[in-house]
Amino acid sequence: MLKMFSPGLWIVLLMAAGSSVLIALLPIPTHPGMEMWVFDPNHAKIARFIAADWNQGHASNPVTIHLITGAAIQSRMMSGFYSDTPIADLIEVERGMIGQVFAGPVADVGFVELTGRLDRENLRTGINGPSFSPWTTRGHIFGLPHDVHPAMLLYRADLVEAAGIDVAKIETWDDYFRILRPLMQDLDGDGRVDRFLLNASPTSIYYQEVLLLQAGGRMFDEMNQPTLNEPVNARIIARLATWYAGPGHVASEITLGGASSMRLVREGYVVGLLAPDWFAGSIRTSLPDMAGKFKVMPLPAWEKGGRRTSVLGGTMLGITKAGRTPEAAWAFAKQLYLSPATAQRLYEEARIVSPIKANWPEPFYDVPDPYFCGQAIGRMYLKLAPDVPLRPSSPYYGLAQQLLNQSVSQLCAYADDHRLYNAAALEPEARRLLQEAQRQLQAQMDRNAFLRPAAR
Amino acid sequence: MKNSRLHSVWTPWLFLAPFLLSFTAFIAWPAVRSLMLAFEQTFGPRTIAFVGLTNFRFMLHDPFFWTAVGNTVLFTVAAVVTQIPAALGLALLLNRADLRGRRLFRVIFFAPSIVGLAFVAIIYSIMLEKRTGFINSSLHSLLPAWDPDFPWLDHYVMPSLILAVLWLSAGFYMVYFLAALQNVPGELLDAANIDGASPWQRFRHVTLPEIRPVLNIILLLVVTGSFQFFELPYLLYNETNGNGPDNKALTIVTYLYQTGFRSGDLGYASAIGWLLTLVLVGLALIQRRLTQKEEL
């Protein structure tokens, strides 16, 4: 037997067998109790703080918080749902990740349905209603909302006040652009405008939706059917095109993130920025030297008396079906998301307001913030929370967003080609583009065998 | 005797086993499974619906797919007509014995290909930024009439991508051409010179036929690489999942990735993947045919 193979081959075989045994014997790291995956460092910090408290009372089933990047959470989560690979008991999911979770039959969604629990424990009425919409598919709720994310307008108070402008006179977007017009200036004398009034452009994929939602437009209805071709959407994108296109355009975009974009914000390239609560928190951290130069105000309405807010972003906490102790996970989820302590830390760390109505009277929301010229921005955001528009969820949300953006870009190109910078004149083309976008979206959705009524 | 026969029968298989096992597990079986997937719609491996040719039929009428095909073909044509002449031109220049510092130039031109596409995407996104980007701010300083907000990445999507890949790849293919040029027999060039051939005639009738096998390989690499173009648009236009403004950066592989890994529609993504495979195999066969004809 020994002579069957050469010594060299025996060595190779022994090494292969030895290393296989070693790998097989390596202990798989296991955490006692529950695991929670979080994608945001601020959320992780708060979750660890609450988990420390939970773990004292639940030594046999403690919670371990893992901070993981969003993309990694999405792949691991889907892999866990599809193929039973190891997955956490609780996962925080960002709005952009949820579509894929909802792409199959409702029964196959990897999260525990929470509709019944929320109703039984009378929690639904205590949480801001619109905050549930992104986490609901075909009438079933799969997540506890983390936030509301009402949007306001963050503006350069130093520039506006130096020009003697009173923002209290601004009620609509038309007022905003008319009253702030003197701020659109050529600062270096080269004959070109160096300061714009709003940070937005045809390519800003998120802002079109924010403005559309504010106006009462939407991409899907409550039954998750596409509604891109609704007349209100055409009216809004026609008006957006007049902001973005032509030599007199009033909006331009800084792609926020890098150092150069922060330089442009600092230099006042744009006067106003669409700012959900988390963005106010983030700008405070990114540009500490700009303290006392920004203020927030409710979004100017599309029409007099119209909605003064919108919504951008969002996170939910889901309990995975694969979790070993779903009841304990639910108890921890409630302790984490419903407690005033979490609401306070979330506001103090990130300026994010709580969706839990019982937390809204908390005094920390009334503390003046020196960064925003002494405004109590927490209270200002909370006043707008009940008006936040609904955002029905869909696995085709990303595609709808792309199609909406494509329509806005094409409409701007059409405006430039025909030198048409009047919203009423652009509306028929806007309707045509959105009809086509709707047709494409519907065609993609019709192909999905799992979303047909019979498969639901 | 028996042992020796056993030895001779099993030894090759044992040596081949690691390759065969990994090939079967990671190439052959996934290929077969993806072919099956192309006829299915799935939500994970447990929820599967057989849909026959639906995925392929849908592809024929899918405007996103055709936009992706159009962009990919445009990029491929542009890549061939820019990268190959640029690489060959650089190689001819740097092959001249009388050029001082040619080693340094070779390193300089080859350097971008070491850094990779992710780095190129970062560099280009910074360089082409409006107002603060190197290109716009330099042009505005030199020509005050230049718009510092010139939207390179918004309005000139394909030229920006072509330029970025040219910068990255020209030096890489230059090395192949340099190696080929150094194998052109000097005596043939000398003979042509003595016969009074002009530099162009020497290039056309001596150099080009000698480097043609390498040229064919590079052509194949550029074409197949361009049909698989993904990373750069994905990284440059990350906010739109690689589509770019008005889908101008959408390529076949970007669409495949979005369909399979963002929307979770692995069946349709597999159908796109198989069509791409057929196109690439077809192009390789055509190229081989043409090469064989030339050799005959």
Image: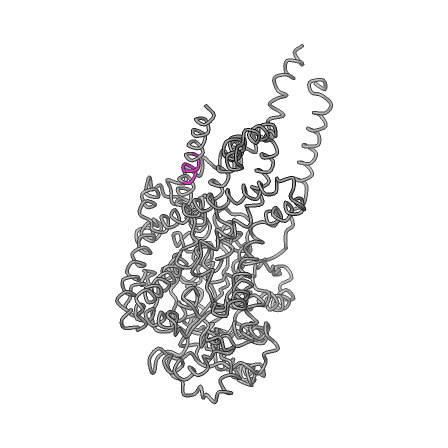
Q: Is residue B277 magenta?
A: yes
Q: Quadrant of residue A198?
A: bottom left
Q: Does residue A116 show up?
A: no
Could you tell whether A398 is left or right of B218 in the image? left
Compared with residue B269, is residue A264 higher up or lower down, i.e. above or below?
below
Could you tell whether B89 is left or right of A400 in the image? right
The stretch in magenta equals B276-281
At 35% from the left and 41% from the top, the residue drawn is: B50
Q: Is residue A85 magenta?
A: no
List x then y, in percent, for residue A15.
71, 32
List x then y, in percent, for residue A425.
27, 71
Q: Quadrant of residue A394?
A: bottom left
At 48% from the left and 82% from the top, the residue drawn is: A380
How is the structure coloured here? Answer: one colour
Q: Does residue B241 show up?
A: yes
Return the residue nearer the eye: B63 or A297.
B63
Q: Main secondary structure of the magenta part?
A: helix
At 61% from the left and 42% from the top, the residue drawn is: B94
